[in-house]
């Protein structure tokens, strides 16, 4: 049997940055176990009002004369909590699946290995230069420290111009239509560049021939539609969030995108507008966070390739669009002519 894990035999994928247990993690070390658990009980109800928090602990229990270790994970978010308990994590892949959507994983550093940790002490009148050492009574300062770590690790935002559709109803490539004195793909690219760190074109395989555009991401999935473009972007750069905008939206504008970015909630897997009818989330003017990567593949494994279905059935931030016309799409020649006329009237 050949070596199936030989990396030279497989596609080289970009792996998301990861700590020992989570994307973002912090150990809590103290003089004893109860002090760690006490400070966790003090800070997590406050932190979990805004963030998704997990606390990872290890217990030693006595059962029928036998000693056993148990791994315990508490999940806390917006007043809700859940627990996972087992003798151990089966493997690192299960661990990543379990903790992948948390904004931060807090870890009992007295019991478990972690690279970065804070130290809690109970010594009155002691002073410290190191800002990672906290008195037991300094819960407010510790909460602020953890909040700063979460906010400083917020993924940067990239833009993605979805232009890989076949435009069969329009009869010509919708990305090349001119609504604003330039091709629509270039118009959308410029809008995204104003609110994003970097912007990329999402293209299907063979779409641009030998003409390689700068910042181009070729779709790695055949006939999967927009979901393939979104997944291909996450596969290419998995530690960035992606503001996705389709090329068939003639009325999309700077104000709409700026507003969406201002409403971004990085604790959710995505931030999306409600569609013009106010019924369903709009997946093609949306911010997809790195934590959506796993969710998108999960739905795909269940046989669903609709990104809207992912949003409907996931924990997302829904935003009411300022002007519903911004989300009106143009799929047929008559839609193009009407949109072009409406835009010329507004000048």
Image (tube, rainbow, N blue to C red):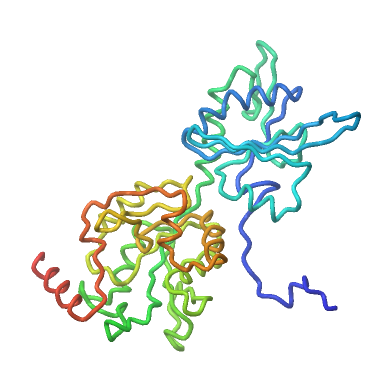
Q: Is residue 230 left or right of residue 85?
A: left
x 69%, y 53%: residue: 94
Q: Is residue 27 left or right of residue 341?
A: right
Total marks placed? 0
Q: Where, quadrant-wise, is the C terminus in this rendering?
A: bottom left
- The x and y percentages for residue 9 are 73, 78
The residue sitting at the right extreme is 65
The residue sitting at the top extreme is 125
- The x and y percentages for residue 208 are 42, 85
x 51%, y 67%: residue: 231
Up/down of 15 relative to 86, above or below? below
The residue sitting at the bottom extreme is 210
Q: Is residue 272 left or right of residue 332?
A: right
Q: Where, quadrant-wise, is the N terminus in this rendering?
A: bottom right
Residues 323 and 282: in front is 282
Residues 153 and 73: in front is 73
């Amino acid at each position: 049997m050949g070596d199936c894990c030989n990396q030279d035999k497989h596609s080289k994928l970009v792996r998301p940055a990861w700590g020992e247990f989570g994307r973002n993690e912090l150990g809590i070390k103290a003089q004893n176990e109860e002090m760690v658990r006490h400070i966790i009980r003090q800070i997590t109800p406050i932190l979990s009002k805004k963030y998704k928090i997990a606390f990872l602990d290890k217990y030693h229990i006595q059962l029928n004369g036998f000693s056993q270790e148990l791994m315990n994970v508490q999940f806390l978010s917006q007043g809700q909590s859940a627990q996972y308990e087992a003798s151990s994590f089966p493997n690192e892949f299960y661990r990543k699946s379990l903790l992948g959507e948390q904004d931060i994983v807090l870890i009992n550093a007295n019991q478990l290995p972690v690279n970065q940790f804070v130290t809690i002490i109970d010594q009155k009148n002691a002073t410290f230069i190191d800002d990672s050492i906290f008195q037991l009574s300094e819960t407010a300062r510790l909460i602020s420290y953890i909040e700063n770590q979460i906010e400083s690790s917020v993924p940067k935002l990239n833009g993605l111009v979805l232009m890989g559709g076949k435009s069969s109803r329009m009869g010509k490539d919708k990305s090349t239509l001119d609504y604003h004195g330039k091709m629509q793909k270039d118009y959308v690219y410029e809008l995204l560049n104003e609110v994003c760190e970097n912007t990329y074109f999402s293209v299907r395989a063979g779409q641009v021939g030998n003409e390689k555009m700068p910042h181009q991401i070729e779709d790695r999935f055949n006939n999967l539609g927009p979901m393939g473009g979104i997944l291909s972007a996450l596969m290419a750069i998995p530690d960035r969030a992606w503001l996705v905008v389709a090329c068939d939206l003639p009325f999309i504008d700077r104000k709409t995108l700026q507003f969406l970015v201002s409403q971004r909630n990085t604790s959710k897997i995505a931030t999306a507008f409600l569609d013009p009818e106010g019924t369903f989330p709009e997946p093609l003017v949306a911010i997809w966070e790195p934590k959506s990567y796993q969710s998108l593949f999960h739905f795909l494994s269940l046989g669903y390739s609709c990104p809207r279905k992912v949003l409907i059935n996931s924990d997302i931030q829904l935003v009411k669009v300022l002007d519903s016309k911004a989300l009106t799409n143009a799929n047929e020649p008559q839609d193009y002519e009407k949109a072009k006329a409406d835009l010329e009237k507004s000048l």
